[in-house]
Amino acid sequence: MTGADTERQHRLSPGAGQVVLVPAEPATESAYERRSSYRLTDPGLSELPLEELLNELLVRVQEALGVDTVAILLLDIESQQLVARAAKGIEEEVEQGVRLPLGQGFAGRIAAERVPIFIADVDHADVLNPILREKGIASLLGVPLIVEGELIGVLHVGSLTPRAFGQDDLAVLQIAAARAAPAIEHARLYAELEHEHGVSMVLQRSLLPKRLVDVVGVSVAARYLPAREEVGGDWYDVFELPRGRVGVVIGDVVGHGIAAAALMGRLRTALHSYAIEGHGAGRTLELVDRFVQSLDESAMATAAYAVFDTYTSSLQYATAGHLPPVVISGSEARVLDVTPAPPLGAFPYGRCPDHELSLESSEMLLLYTDGLVERRGVALTAGIEALATAVRGARTPESACALALRKLVPREGLRDDVAIVALQNAAVPAELHVTLPAEPKALAQVRRILRRWLNERGADEGEIAEMTIAVSEACANAIEHAYAPSPATFELHGRARDGEFTMTVRDRGRWRPPRGHNRGRGLSIIVAAMDDVQIDRTSEGTEVVMRRRIATK
Amino acid sequence: MSLADVQITLAPSALIANVTGEVDMSNAEEVGATVVGATPNEAQGVILDLSGVDYLDSAGIYVIYGMRASLQARGQVLILVIPPTSPVHDSLRLSGAERPGEVAEAVDEALRMLDGRPFSDS
């Protein structure tokens, strides 16, 4: 820059030491600028969250112009102040939360007058920001950030040695500003939305199960994905029911946002409560429908609910205006039949007929919400078929959920939220071998494991009942032997061969002779229920081996 | 999920305790204490309704004996309700125990048994 140029620009400057730069029209795009602007307008930038985007822009501007400092100040509309949001070389600006008034000083004037400003010699300039002076910055160049005619902030660069920023530098900085401003605004709006979204999200998360139930005989997995813009009312739940049964439900409250999330929480609780009362799948949904009808607000939801019996592998299911469940069976997956039933809260006395099937060992039931299969311009049945195709061959509930989401969630994000839950009839091992903590509450678990295993190995109802009580009594003995030092465990081993069951319970405690009526009675139950009982007591522990033949069919 | 539940109803002459779920060494004593603790002195007896019990082990049987003893000490009777198909029969049969109280097949039968008792008994 020549002395004459400086002189001319000084004349244009409205304040001492400040120069308002007027860029040549149109900005000359040298090879250098084009290279820089490519880096500055990389489309990948707009994908970044606000903080990362600002940071990345600073690095690229610093690189393109070879400057010592770069800073972005954004306009805070409420206070009408510029707030330092990101900086390189003068990070203190951001750390100290520098706020500058509009209209005064270097950045304030760029923002108020929407003009680029160049300061050749900071010492003589009216720079309000003390950090810039303390740093010993010699020269500054800044441009406004404008989106659709609205000022959103200021981008400025600085040099520690005196530097006459020229038209080329200005052009690069303006290209950076022009490309960065909309991305910043987009990210900022998104961050605000994120906050609102965050509130519904926290609610949604707090209403979904923290941890899926751990029940003998099933393995489960679930996923919830919020929509890109708004949280909806999708929910799922898995819970244990009396007599070795498990309930699994998925639902979708009509509507979005906090209200939908809150209603979802109420429906989830209502359904669980009715289910525990022992109602079947369809009746449980009908009762939830009556509950929705009784609410003051007009509310509607769809749901699919299934009850799986871990002892017998039978599955009962019903739907209310919801999409049909899918069953995965090895390399095949099929869409289940449902009787069309109105959504919950839609019509008085809606009926939800039950359907039954046998969910064989390793087979999986998949429940999902429409967000997963509904795509604009694609028939719903095609979406459901696509889901069935996506999940076939899945071996675990986790992989079924992962496959469904990977293959069906579009790259650009979801328009509606998605919930999916998979329940698998866990394979029953040919031989039973479990180690359990020596605590009374382990007995219930022993019986669940045993009933399932005995059923699978061909024992009939009466045989299952008698062998279960015998083994449970033997385990109760093992738990009684296991006193301190804790933690103690006991083992249960089961084998079925040629119609003969051999059950072994082993502990590492010291044998205690039966005390009172009670333990003596426990032993007599074992002896009465089994054909042959051997008790082996050593200093290592006690082993009870029980045998029984079953009636062969 | 809780293993068992106890629902208590007071009839004019008796306390009816409806037990559902599974009773084993982990909860038998609490179930027994709940029922005995809720029984008013003026009740003629307790009807222990086991129709909803899916499983009863030796610890449960022992507690029922204990209940009978403590009620007897207060001049009250214990009547068990066990439907013919109940798994509780299996437990009692296998344990070789004598019946730990009078047995009815349903609650109304138990109430009739209680009302029919000579008053001098209490």
Image (cartoon, coloured by chain):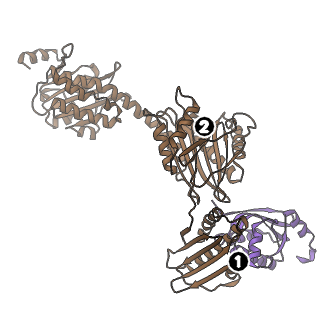
Chain colours: A brown, B purple
* Chain-order first, disc 1 or disc 2: 2
Query: Relative to residue A399, is residue A472 depicted above or below?
Result: below
Do discs 1 and 2 share a chain? Answer: yes
Quarter of the view holding residue A318: top right
- In the image, is A84 to the left or to the right of A487? left
Pinpoint the chain carrying mark 1: A
Number of marks present in the image shown: 2
What x and y, as percent, mark residue A186? 37, 28
Which type of secondary structure does the marked residue at label 2 adopt? strand
Closer to the camera in the image, B22 or A341: A341
The quadrant the N terminus of chain B occupies is bottom right
What crowding class fits label 2: few (fewer than 14 Cα within 10 Å), some (14-19), or many (20 or more)? many
- In the image, is A61 to the left or to the right of A194? left
Closer to the camera in the image, B116 or A235: A235
Q: What type is the residue that disc 2 sits on?
A: Val
What x and y, as percent, mark residue A210? 52, 51
Is residue A438 at least partly visible in the picture? Answer: no
What x and y, as percent, mark residue A57? 26, 32
Between circles 1 and 2, the one closer to the viewer is 1
Closer to the camera in the image, A162 or A345: A345
What crowding class fits label 1: few (fewer than 14 Cα within 10 Å), some (14-19), or many (20 or more)? many
User: Which disc number belongs to residue B105?
Assistant: none
- For image coordinates 6% across by 18% down, the residue present is A2
- Mark 2 sits on what residue? A253
Which type of secondary structure does the marked residue at label 1 adopt? helix
Pinpoint the chain carrying mark 2: A
Q: What type is the residue that disc 1 sits on?
A: Ile
The quadrant the C terminus of chain B occupies is bottom right
Report if the CB atoms under discs 1 and 2 are less than 8 Å apart: no
Q: Residue furthest left?
A: A3
User: Which disc number belongs to residue A525?
Assistant: 1
- In the image, is B98 to the left or to the right of A79? right
